[in-house]
Image (cartoon, helix red, strand yellow):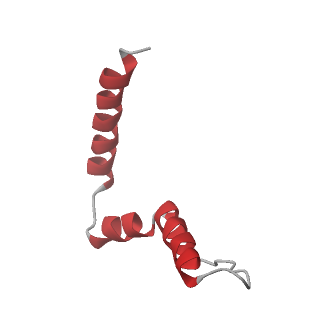
Amino acid sequence: MLIIDVKDNESIERALKKYKRKFDRAGIMKELRSRKHFVKPSIKRRGEIQKAVYKQKTYGEQG
């Protein structure tokens, strides 16, 4: 559950902006989408390895 502290003189728009920012940073939508379908651990691990290889190729050559 997300808790947003709203001050007395703070507008609703400002509080909503805080809520949206906190919601995005918490990764709730990402979590929901990942739980929608079961992914076998071996396939999940394969994806992580492919991502690491891609990052290594892309960012490893720069520095």
Residue at 55% x, 67% y is 22
Residue at 29% x, 30% y is 54
Against 8, residue 26 (above or below) is: above
Query: In the image, 63: left or right of 39?
Result: right
Query: In the image, 33: left or right of 31?
Result: left
Residue toward you, 23 or 43:
23
Residue toward you, 49 or 25:
25
Tell me the quadrant of the picture where the N terminus can be found.
bottom right
Residue at 33% x, 64% y is 34
Query: In the image, 15: left or right of 59?
Result: right
Against 55, residue 11 (above or below) is: below
- Which corner quadrant of the image does residue 47 belong to? top left
Picture coordinates of residue 50, whole percent (x, y):
28, 35
Query: In the image, 8: left or right of 22?
Result: right
Picture coordinates of residue 38, whole percent (x, y):
28, 66
Picture coordinates of residue 18, whole percent (x, y):
57, 70
Picture coordinates of residue 8, whole percent (x, y):
74, 85
Question: Which residue, as the protein is rendered here, is positioned at the far right?
Answer: 8
Tell me the quadrant of the picture where the C terminus can be found.
top left
Q: How many marks?
A: 0
